[in-house]
Every structure is written in structure tokens, then in C-alpha cells.
Amino acid sequence: MSQKLTFDESLGILTLTISANYSKEDMMASTLAVKSYQSRVERIRLLVDARSATPEMPLADIFDFPDEIYFDQAINRRNLLALLPPVSTRGRKQAEFYVDACENRGRLVKLFDSMEEAIEWLLKPAD
């Protein structure tokens, strides 16, 4: 797995860039890295750039992830996650499934095709 986590202080956006194969274990490691920022901000605004990623997770793992990991790790439900999906058809379908699984559990996750739209959504005032 190859990932890079950066925080843009001026925008208040945390960006996770994934550029290789991506497994459930990798997703867990990413979640824990992102969680470390939770104590520093009221609401994490996370941009996940997975356009170069190759997901290697069965749909069952993707379905379970929001409950199994986010709940167990006490990830704030008010956090926002904007996802730029992998370019492959399979990767995009998995990303769409992940967004649905998260939304069905009350997570604020949305899929985007452009970086600009994703950032605009992340910067909208909180409801």
C-alpha cells in the first residue's frame, strides 16, 4: 500500500492520497491515522483521492467497515468524507457501494468526480 496523509491548515482539509493496491488492513491503518486528527478539530473534513488506487476488498468487508471499524474506533459521525473514486469500473463500483454503506449508517460520505467539487462540498458550512 502507498498512501500519503496531509493536512491543509488554510482550508482545514485532511487529504488521504492512495496510489496502489488497497486492502481492509490498509483501510484500517488509514482510519487510525485520520482518527489522530479528531482531537485537533471539531469535525474532520477528509478528502480521499483514490483515483490511482486498486481496491482489493470483498464487498462483505466494505459493507461491514462503517460499523465494524468506525463505530468501534468512535469515529465522529459529524466528520465529512469526500471520495474521488478509482478510475477502474470495478473500483468505482466498490466506491459507490462503500458510500451507500456509510450513508445507510448515518455517515456523511459523498462521491465526486472532480477535486474542485469535493473541496467545495467539504468547505460548506455545517448544518
Image (spheres, grey):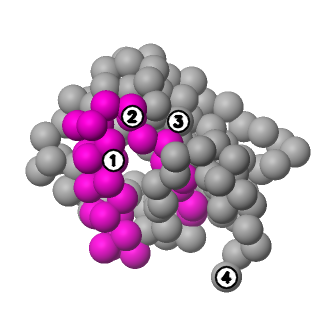
Provide the residue designation for mark 4.
127
Identify the residue position indicated by label 3 in the image.
49
Q: What's under tag 1, amino acid-wise?
A: Ala
Give the mark, 4 or 2, whose residue is nearer the N terminus.
Answer: 2
Q: Which is more toward the observer, 66 or 81?
A: 81
Magenta segment: does it hold 55?
Answer: no
Residue contact at pointers 2 and 1, CB within 8 angstroms:
yes
Residue 102 placed where, x, y %? 35, 64
Residue denoted by label 2 = 86
**Dot 2 crowding, Cα within 10 Å, few <14, some 14–19, many 20+:** many
Location of residue 36 in the rendering, given as x and y in whole percent from the top left corner? 58, 43
Specify whether 58 is left or right of 80: left
Amino acid marked by disc 4 = Asp
Q: Secondary structure at mark 4?
A: loop
Res 19 label: none
Mark 4 and mark 3 lie on one chain; the one further toward the N terminus is 3
